Image: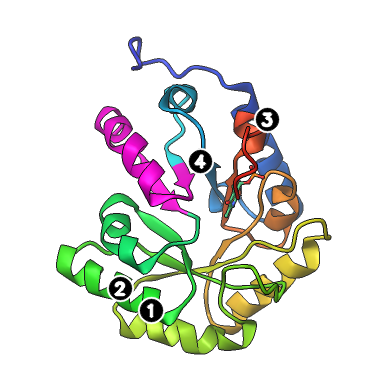
Amino acid sequence: MTVTGKKLENPPLDEIGRKIEKSAKIAGRKADEVALVAVSKTRSSDEIRPLLESGHRVFGENRVQEAAEKWPALKAEYPDVELHMIGQLQSNKAAEAVALFDYIHSVDRMSLVKALGKEMDRQDRHPPCFLQVNIGEESQKGGCDIAAVPQMLQQLRDAGIKVAGLMAVPPEGTNAMPYFALLAKLARDNGLDGLSMGMSGDFEKAIKLGATHIRVGTALFGPRETNQT
Ligand SMILES: *Cc1c(COP(=O)(O)O)cnc(C)c1O
């Protein structure tokens, strides 16, 4: 709790804020066009609280179950928290996801679009969604095919889902820049502004290529014990 009402300093948060500002400036953009989604997966509420006490409100989780265990209590303390679902989502978790999250970054297939659309209508709650694109055409990875983007966007709209933009996770161990550039082009070609791309290791590059939402975990919280992605 913020007993004094004063915002506490948080050196990693401040450092990332400076980097966001610098990258945005280089790209001729404004820093406030970039939302920092603090990825709190695997972190306990006690680890998350210092960021809340510093005034940060935008967080990302990759598992519905884990988010449902941590966030209702934290949201009771900090009602203006904005919670983002960034991980693969099973259709049978659609109801819980729609109830809990304010944005969903990982919509990538028809069955999920249908399940989410139905739940949004039922709950009368419409969290904007990013279409996740398998930008590196990796067989194991979530995300729709690049060629399917226009048709998938139409499906989202037909289901009454608000489209926030495109999201991707480039292949590990490669230069992410061409993938960021490709995602940005896909967004432009489809008349979308929102771009969820860039993580701890590459968010500055992502901002230079137009990211509106960066998803940063380890740079804020330190290394995760499990290599959960
Ligand atoms: C874990 C995760 C992140 C954050 O990764 P870091 O390297 O810790 O910044 C971003 N996006 C997705 C989809 C993730 O699962």
Q: Could you say whether the residue bearing mark 1 is in a helix, strand or loop?
A: helix
User: Which residue is denoted by mark 4 in the rendering?
Assistant: 41
- Front one among 108 and 79: 108
Residue 29 lies in magenta, yes or no?
no
Check whether the beta carbons of the residues at disc 4 and disc 3 lie within 8 A of each other.
no
Is residue 143 depicted above or below 169 in this figure? below
Separation (CA) of disc 1 from disc 4:
25 Å
User: Which residue is denoted by mark 1 in the rendering?
Assistant: 111
Q: Is residue 103 left or right of residue 144?
A: left
Residues rendered magenta in the picture: 59-85
Determine if residue 82 is in view. no
Q: In percent of the image, x 28 and y 27: which residue is there? A: 77
- Indicate which disc residue 15 carries: 3
For label 4, count other residues whose C-alpha is less than 10 Å away and answer few (under 14), some (14-19) or many (20+). many
- Indicate which disc residue 96 carries: none
Separation (CA) of disc 1 from disc 3:
40 Å
Q: In percent of the image, x 35 and y 71: which residue is there? A: 162
Q: Is residue 16 left or right of residue 82?
A: right
Q: In percent of the image, x 55 and y 18: which residue is there? A: 9
Q: Position of residue 94 (x, y in %)?
A: 31, 63
Q: Could you say whether the residue bearing mark 2 is in a helix, strand or loop?
A: helix
Nearer the N terminus, badge 4 or badge 3?
3
- Front one among 195 and 144: 144
Residue type pointed to by label 4? Lys
